[in-house]
Every structure is written in structure tokens, then in C-alpha cells.
Image: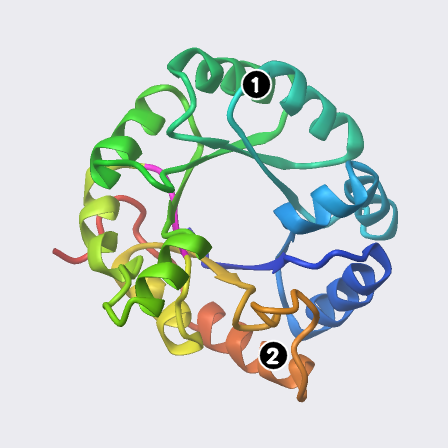
């Protein structure tokens, strides 16, 4: 598949999120993500506002569903989301219900393996239960607290090859990647490149990063899109 650049709008103000989204789309970003902080701050209204402003752009609602799977997916779809996120640590029936809602309402389902004891096994289970994409995710708190202890935090690239090889659906890697690492993920067979905290969004204040963000995003998009087709599920070993 053609590689995709997704910006994670991990902001807490809808007006700032809308202006950042406009900038990102001018730079060549393909998908918008209503990040978890934005949904917590603004509710599903943030998804509605993004959909109103950008009627043709895919929007990922990163609510990180753990329970009430069908209802939450239905609500996100009704607000205008094109993709929803369910956690591998949720009960199997919750994952099944999010998948059912995805089919009923015509939206994609992204399965997130954050905090799974077996990241590869969780990715396989998410695919078996019907998810359309895998989010291979090392969490914000996990990375930060381990680093504060002076230890090396886990990096999504550590197991990315194994994740890609274990499934036949598209994978994205999230959590503490540098810009160079994020842009390199298609080389691992993971075509969904996420740009967000701390790349385009400041990871401490959760506000839009300073500097020439639009120019930086344009360079990132040009690099990612230059990969051409990425073989899903058949990345290098």
C-alpha cells in the first residue's frame, strides 16, 4: 500500500487543533487524528468540528476503547470519525463489538497493543478478531518513568519487524520515536507513519511545537511518500 502520514493532534484546545490540522494538510499529511487529550478536553465535539472543517479527510478518533465497545465506536462514527481505536488489553468481546460496529457503520478499526505482555501475540489476536490495522505502541508514562530512572525505555522499533511479520494488515509504530525513526518505519514494512508528540506536538505542554512546523512536515511527507508501495505483512526480516 502507499505509505500514509497521520498527524496526532494531542492538543487540548479545538481551535489550536483545527489550525494545526490545516497547516498539516497543506504540508501533505494524509490523515488527522483526534488525539486522546483532545477528546478528553473537548469530547466528541472535536471530531465533529474536524469533520465539518475537513469533510473528505480520514479522521482517527483515538479514544482507546476498553469497554462499551459498540456504543463508543457508534458514537465516534456518528461524530464523523473514519477510524476508531480499541485496546488489546480490553476484553475479547469488547474488541469483537468494536469490529462489529466498524462493519455496521463503515469505519476502520485500529487495534492498539499498548501495555500488552506479549506485543506480538497481541497484534496477532487483534488481527484474528477482525481489526483492520495494528497500532504498535509504547506508552507515554512507560517511556517517561523508565527514562527518569536512568534506564533505556523501550522503543517501538525494538519489536516492529516481528510485529509486521506476524500479521497481514497494515501496522503503525507509535511512542517516543524521533522524526528520523518515524520516517523510517516504512522500511520495516509499516506504512502508516504517525507524527505527533514529541515530533510536531510538544510532549510536555501538549501544544503545537514551535519553529517552522509546516516546512518540517512537508519534508517529512515528501520523504514518506517517496517510498512508493510498501508490502504489508511482508516487511524485511
Residue name at image x 39 percent, y 68 percent: 177
Q: Nearer the viewer, residue 106 or 85?
A: 85
**From this viewpoint, is residue 148 visible?**
yes
Residue 55 colored magenta?
A: no
Query: Callout 2: few (<14), some (14-19), or many (20+) C-alpha neighbours within 10 Å?
Result: some
Quadrant housing the C terminus = bottom left
Magenta residues (range):
169-174
Name above or below for residue 199 compared with residue 87: below
Q: Give the main secondary structure, helix, strand or loop, of the magenta stretch.
A: strand
Determine which quarter of the picture holds residue 132: top left
Residue name at image x 80 percent, y 49 percent: 50
Please give the residue where the numbered disc 1 appears in the rendered image. Answer: 69
Q: Position of residue 153 (x, y in %)?
A: 28, 63
Give the number of the disc on residue 218: 2
Q: Position of residue 194 (x, y in %)?
A: 50, 60
Q: Nearer the viewer, residue 206 or 200?
A: 206
Name above or below for residue 205 compared with residue 1: below
Spatial CA span between label 2 and label 1: 36 Å
Amino acid at each position: 500500500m502507499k505509505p500514509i502520514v497521520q498527524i496526532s493532534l494531542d492538543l487540548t484546545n479545538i481551535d489550536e487543533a483545527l489550525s494545526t490540522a490545516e497547516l498539516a494538510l497543506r504540508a501533505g499529511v494524509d490523515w488527522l487524528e483526534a488525539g486522546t487529550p483532545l477528546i478528553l478536553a473537548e469530547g466528541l465535539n472535536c471530531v465533529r468540528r474536524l469533520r465539518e472543517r475537513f469533510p473528505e479527510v480520514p479522521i482517527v478518533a483515538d479514544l482507546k476503547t476498553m469497554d462499551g465497545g459498540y456504543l463508543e465506536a457508534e458514537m465516534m462514527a456518528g461524530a464523523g470519525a473514519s477510524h476508531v481505536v480499541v485496546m488489546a488489553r480490553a476484553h475479547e468481546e469488547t474488541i469483537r463489538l468494536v469490529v462489529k460496529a466498524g462493519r455496521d457503520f463503515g469505519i476502520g478499526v485500529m487495534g492498539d497493543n499498548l501495555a500488552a505482555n506479549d506485543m506480538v501475540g497481541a497484534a496477532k489476536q487483534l488481527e484474528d478478531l477482525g481489526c483492520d490495522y495494528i497500532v504498535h505502541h509504547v506508552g507515554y508514562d512507560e517511556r517517561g518513568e523508565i527514562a527518569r530512572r536512568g534506564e533505556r525505555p523501550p522503543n517501538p522499533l525494538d519489536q516492529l519487524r516481528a510485529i509486521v511479520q506476524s500479521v497481514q494488515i497494515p501496522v503503525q509504530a507509535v511512542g517516543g520515536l524521533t522524526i528520523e525513526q518515524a520516517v523510517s518505519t516504512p522500511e520495516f514494512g509499516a506504512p502508516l507513519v504517525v507524527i505527533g508528540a514529541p515530533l510536531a506536538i510538544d510532549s510536555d505542554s501538549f501544544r503545537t511545537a514551535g519553529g517552522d512546523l509546516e516546512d518540517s512536515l512537508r519534508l517529512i511527507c515528501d520523504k514518506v511518500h517517496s517510498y512508493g508501495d510498501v508490502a504489508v505483512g511482508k516487511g524485511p526480516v
